Image: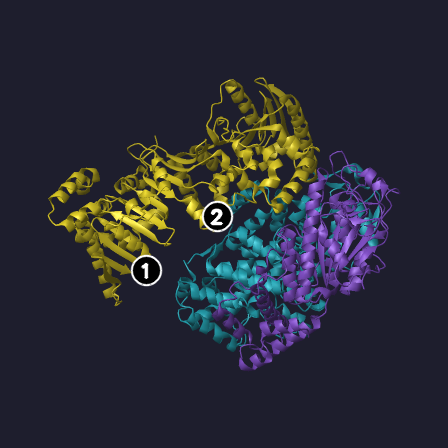
Chain colours: A yellow, B purple, C cyan
Amino acid sequence: MFAHKHTLPGSLAPGVVLLCLLASSPSIAADKAKAEKSAAQLLPSSTIVYAEVTQPKKLLAALLDHPLRKRVESLPPVAKALDGPGYVIVNAVVKHLEEQIGLPWRGAVGALSAGGIHFAIDGRTKGAVLLVKSRDAKTLVTVRDALFKLVRQDAKTKKKPDPIEDKTYRGIPAYKMNDLLLATAGRWLMVTNNAKLGREVLDRYLGDDSKPLADNSRFQTARKTIAGDPTLWAYLNVAAIRDAGIAAELFSGKTDNPAIELLAGGILDTLGQTPFATGSLYLDDKQARLVLATPHQRGWTSKGRAYYLGPKGEAAAPPLLLPKQTLLSLSTYRDLGGMWNAAPDIFNEQANAGLSKANSDLSNLFAGQDFGEDVLGAMRPEIQIVLARQDFTASDLPTPAIKLPAGAIVFRMKDPAKSGRRMKVAYQSIIGFLNIAGAQNGQPQFELDSETHDGGKIVSATYLLDDEEIAAKTGKINYNFSPSIGLIDGRLIIASTRQLARELVTLIKASGSSAEKQTANTQVRLSARVLSEVLGDNKKQLLAQNMLEKGHTPQQAEAEIGMLLGILGWAKDASLKLSINKQAMRLEVGLRFQETSADGRKD
Amino acid sequence: MSTTRRRFLSASLGSSAMVAMTPRVPGFLLEAAAREQDNKQGENVLVVVQLSGGNDGLNTVVPYADDAYGRNRFTLRIGKDQVRKIDDYAGFHPAMEGFAKLLEDEKLAIVQGVGYENPNRSHFESMDIWHTARRKGQPRRVGWLGASLDAAARVGPDVPAMHLGQGKQPLALASLKVNVPSIRSLESFCFRDGKDRALVGAIEQALTPKRDANNDLLQFLHGSTSAALASSRRIQEVLGRGKTTVQYPATKLAGKLRDVAQLIDADLGTRVYYVTLNGFDTHAAQNNAHAALLGELAGALTAFSEDLKSRGHDRRVLTLAFSEFGRRLRENASAGTDHGAAAPLFLIGPRVKPGLIGRHPSLTDLTSGDLKYHTDFRRVYATLLENWLGWKSAEVLGGKYKPLNVLA
Amino acid sequence: MNSDLSKIDPRQAWQPFVPDAKRPWNRALAAHLYRRAGFAATWDQLTAAVKQEPAELVAQLVRGPKTDEAFERQSRDLAEAMLATGNPQNLSAWWLHRMIGAPHPLLEKTTLFWHGHFATSAAKVTDPRLMLAQHELLRQHALGKFGPLVQAVSRDPAMLIYLDSTTNRKVRPNENYARELMELFCLGEGNYSEQDIKQIARCFTGWEVRNGRFRFREFQHDEGSKTFFGKTGNFGGQDAVRIVLDQPAAAEFIAGKLFRFFVCDEPAPPPALIDPLAEQLRKNDFTTGPVIERILSSRLFFSGASVGRKIRSPVELSVGLLRALGGATNVYRLAEELAQLGQAVFFPPNVKGWEGGRYWINTSTLLGRANLVGRLVSGEESKFAAGDLAQLAERCGATSPEEVVDWLLELLVAVPIPRKAREPLVKLARSTGGAAGKPVGTVIHAMSLLPEFQLG
C-alpha cells in the first residue's frame, strides 16, 4: 500500500537534511531547519498537559486491524449502526475526500500524521493546541484544501456564509473556523482555540527559541521515564495544576470517605507533592496496558498514612491467592487497625463521628471486643481477598436460584495463639446472633461444625434444613452461604462457604514456607472467563431482570444478555497493580484479550 | 395575614392586580386558595424526632452530682467539669452545646422520668408501644398520630403529615384512611416540568374553566389540582431562594430538618413532620458513638430552631425528641449500656415552659436495675394532641390522660 | 339515567344496557368499560369494540381469552426469578409487569380488588413465597365462589402471619382473625357482637402457622360447644366461615364492595340498589363473576352515575396509560413510584386495604401522578410498541394538533373536558414541534394535571 512505503520518518530525515543543504534560498533553508523542531520545542514551557501519539499509523493499525474489530462490527447494535443512514453519509464524505486527495483514507491519515500527533493544554494562556506533523508539506496542503473545499461547498449549498476565514501570520497561511484557528506551517498542522498560544507556537516555528516545553526540567525528567514504545504517552504538570488551585480537593491529601481512603489514601499525599505524572498506553493484539506513574518520596507521606505504605514506605502485599475458578483476587498491604487509630488525623469530624458509631455497632457484634483495637488491631497489614465461582454439585443443600460467587478474606494474625481463639468465639456469637435474628424472620438456622483440614482448623456453619424444605427446592439465596473461619499457619480465613475455607487452607498450607517476595502494594486480578461463567450461571435471573427493567420481550432480553456475555468472552482478564518504591509510584491497569484463531473463534 | 404568607400568595397565586391583568389565573380559585391559606394561618405544627435504639438518658441529662451515677458509670461517667450544667444536680452531655443554648433562650423543656408501666425492653415491642399507645394483644392497626389524622384531618389537597426518610414509615403515622407520604427530597413536591412555561401556561389555562357542578369528585379534583400547582410553585420558590442564612451542620438529621423548615415555610397545610435518627443502641464502646449522636441531635435542632425563627414560623412549631427507652443505670463490661426503662424526652420551641419538668428519677430506687418512670408518655401525647394540635386524645390513646403543664 | 343514586329505580338500574340515540354505544363508553373491566383499551381495541354489541363485549371481557400458555409460563418464570431474590418488593414489579401485559385484564383487576379486600402486607410477612402463594389463591378464586376463597384465606399462612394469628390455643383463643373475618372480610361493622367474636375465635383454636405452613393442632382445638348467630355446636373453623357467610349481611357486604369498586366511589348506594346484586350472590353460591358481569353490562354502569365517578388508583392510572399507549417501562421503578403515590401492591397500608376515592388525592400525590406520567411519556426508561408516540398518533389517524388532542382525550380521559380547556392543549400541541413523539408526550403530560385525568 502507498502509505506503507513512504511514511517512515526516520528514513525520510536524511533526505530532508540533504534538501536543506542544497537549498539556495536562505529563507527556505531556515524553514526546513525549523520544520525539524519537535512538538515539545514548539510548545511553551508552561504546558500543563501534553499527550503524544508518535506513531499514529501503528495506533490506527492496532485499532483497525485488531482481531476484535470484526467481532465488534458483528454486534447487532453496531452492525445496525454501520448499516444506518449516519454511516452511509460518513462513507460518502470519506469517498469524496479520497478522490480529492488521491489517497485511500487510511493512507491519507497515515501520511498526514506520519510525524506524530501532539496535544497540549497551556497553563498560562489556558489554551489547547493540537499539533499534527505530516509526512510532507504537499500532502498536508492537499488534504487541507480538499477538506476546506468540502466545507465551503456544504455551506454554499446550505446558503450559509463562508465558514472559513483566510488569514496569515508572519507569512504562514492561517484560517479561522468558528472558534478554532488553523495554520499549516511546513509539515505542521496546528489547531488551537487560543490565538495567543497559536502565535507563540508559530513564533517558535519561525525561529523563536524562548522557553519551550522541551527545556522544562520537569518535562525532561518525565521524558526519561518513558519505557518501551508506548502507543500513547502523556505528561501532566501536576505541580502547576496544583498551584493553579484546580481540583483543590484532590490535592488536599484528605478525604471524608473511608472507602476512598482505603483505596487511594496513600496516593493522595503524593498527588499533593509530586511535580508531575505520566501516563503510557500500550496497545497490541494481545492486550491493552495503561501505566500511570509519578515520582514519589518517603517524606511526602503523612504519618497517618503509614497504614497504607508501611513504616518504611514500601510495604508489599502478599501474593495473590488463586483457588479454583477464581473470579477476583486481591492482595494488599493495609494496616486496618492503624487506620482506625489514625482516623482523627485522616478524616474530618463527620467521618470520625460515623466511624465512632460504626465502632460501637461492630463492637456489639464482636461480643464486646473493641472493633478497632481488639479486632482490627490484632491483624497484620497483609490482606488477601478472593472471590471464586461456586460448585454447587457437591452440596446436599438445594441449589440457590441466584448463584453468587463464594468470597473470603485472609488476614495474618499478630498473635495467632491468642487472636485465633478470640476470633473463633466472636464467630460463634455472630452465628448465634444470626440464628436468633433469622428465627424471628423465619429463616433457616445454622448448625455449627468444626473440623481439621490439611492441618488447619475450620469452624463452619451450614444450614440445617428439614426434609420438607429440601424437597420444596425453594432455591433460597441463603443457600449460597455456609460462613466459616479457618485457622492455619497464623492466618485467619473468613469465608462465605466451607468449601472455599477448605480450599484456602490447602493452598496456604502448600505455599506455607515459600518466600513471599512481592513488590506491589496492591494487586488485583479479575478473570473475564469466570465472570462470564458466573453471569451465565445466573442467566435466567439476568433475563428476568432485563425484561422487567427494560420492558423487553424474552427474545430481546436473550439477545441483549447474550451480547453482554459475548463481549465478556473476548477478554481474558483484567488486572491492576499499584507499586510504590523509594522513587516512584506506579499504577498499572491491564486488559488481556482472549486470543483468537484465524477463523475468529476462541482458542 | 402575616407578611410571609402574603409574600407566598403573591408569589404563587399572583396579587389581585395580576389577576385582573391575566385571565389565566382563575379568580375564584385564587380567592378560595387565599381563604384556605388564611384559615391555615396559625395552625400549629408538630415535628417528631425519633431517636431509635434506646437513648442513654443518663448520659444525655447527666445527674453528675449523684454519687450513685459515678459508682454505676465507672468508665462512661461524665464528670462535673465536663457537663453543661442545667442545675446543681444535672447537666447536658458536653456534645450538646446547642441544647444548653436552647435552654438559655428558653426554648427547651426537658421532661424527666418518662415511660410506662411494666416496661418492655425489646426495641420493637417498646417502639410499637410508643407508636400505638397500645400493649401487645390490643388491636394495633394505627399509630397515635395516624389515628389522630383519621379523626381530625380534612380530606383534600393538604398533606396532613409527612415522614422524611428512606426507611420504613414509622407505625406512629399508620392511619386507616389518610395517605402519609415518605419524602426523600423536596423535589417530590415540585411539578417536574414546572419551568416549562408553555406547558405550565397550558395547564393553568386548561384549569380555568369551571367544571360540571353535578360531579362532586370533579369539583374536588379541580380544587385540589389548583392547590397542588400553587404548592409546587411555593416549594420551587422556597428552593429557588436558596440556602438560608442559618448554617446547618453537615449531618443527615440536619439535612432532613432543613427540608422540614423549607416545607413549613412553603406551607402545605402539614401538621406533623416525622424524622428519625438511628444508632442509639450503644451496648459497646459507647463514649464516642453517643457523643457523635448527641452532637448531631443538638446541632441539627439548634440550627432548625434558628432557621424557623428567621423564617418567622418558630412560634407555631414544636419539636418532640423521644426514644423507645432509656438505658440501664449500671454500665456493662464492654464500655456500653444495656436496654433500660424511663428516660427524659425533649420539647423544643419558643412556646414551651423552659427547664426541667418533673424530678430526675431516683438512682437508688430502681426496678430491675432501671430507673422508674413517673410520667406516662401518653400524658406527653395528650399534651401535644390536645394543647398543641387541638385534636382529641382520649380515643387515640385508649383513655383520658391529663396533659402536662409544659406549654406556655 | 339520573346520576343521583337515591333517585334511581333499582329495577331499572341492573337491566342490561341497550344503546339508544340518547346514549349511543361509542368509543367513550367502550373506553369506560375497558377502564373498569381492566385498566384501559388501546385505540385498536376501541375501534373493534364499537362494532360489537356491548353485552357481547362485556361477556368476552369477563370470560377472558383462552389461557395463553406462553404468557403464563413466562409469568411463572419471572415470578420464580423474583422469589429467588428474596425481596418482596420485586414481586410488586412482577405483578405490575403482568398487569401491563396480561391477556385477561379483568382477572388482574379483580385480583387487585381481593388483595385490597384481604389486605396482607409483605412489610410484615416478609417471605415473598408466602405472598405469592396468597396472590395465586386470590387469582384462582377472583371470579369464582367467595366461600371457598374465604375458607382458603382463613388457612393462608401470609394472612395469619399478618394478623398475628400464627398461634391459637384453646386456653387463650386469639380473637384477631375472628374479628377481621367478620368486620373486614364478610359482614362489615355492626353485623356481629363481641360475643360472636369470642365464640368464633374458639372455632379457630388449633389453627396455626409453622415454618410458613398451615397446620391444625388437634390438642389445641377447643372441642367444646360454641353458640353464635343462633347456632350451637362443636364447630370448627370451616363451620365458622360457613355460618358467617350464611348471615344476610354477607351478600350485601360483598355486593356493596363490588359496587364501590366497579360502579362509583360515592355516594354510598342505597340498600335497595344493592339488594338485587346481593340476591344474585345468594342464589349462585356467592359466585362473583356473574355479578361483575351484570354490573358491567347494566344501564347504571353506562350512565352518568358511573362514568367518571371514580378516582383512579395509582395502579389503574399508570398501568392504564401504558396499556392504552402500548407502552412498557422499568417496572421496578414504577413499583417505587406507586409506593410514593400510596399504592404499593403486596404492601397495602393496613388491614383495611386502600381506602381509595378521595383519599388517593393530596398535593403530594397529584404532583407525583403528573410527574410519573411525565416520566412515562418522556421515554425515560419507558418505550412504546409503535416506536414513538407521534408514530402511534399517526397510525391512529391523528396528525394535526386538533386531531392529536381529540384522539388523546378520547383514549385517555374518562369525561369530556370543557371546550375552553381544550384550546390551550391544542395550542400546546402546535407550539411543541421538533423532536419525534414530543408534542404528543407533552400534551399527555399537560393532561395529567387536568382534574378529569384522575377520573376513571
Between residue B60 and residue C243, name the one nearer to us.
B60
Residue type highlighted by circle 2? Met
Report the quarter where the C terminus of chain A lies: top left
* Residue A399: image location, x then y, percent: 55, 33
- Residue C275, relative to residue C246: is it above or below? below
- Residue B403, relative to residue B6: is it above or below? above
Direction from residue B260 to residue B408 in the image, left or right? right
Q: Residue beneath label 1, please?
A: A179
Identified at 81% across, 56% down, the residue is B355
Q: Which mark is residue A547?
A: 2
Host chain of mark 2: A
Identified at 85% across, 54% down, the residue is B358
Host chain of mark 1: A
Between residue A100 and residue C19, name the one nearer to us.
A100
- Residue A195, relative to residue C85: is it above or below? below
* Residue B220: image location, x then y, percent: 63, 71
Q: How many numbered discs sit on the rendered protein? A: 2
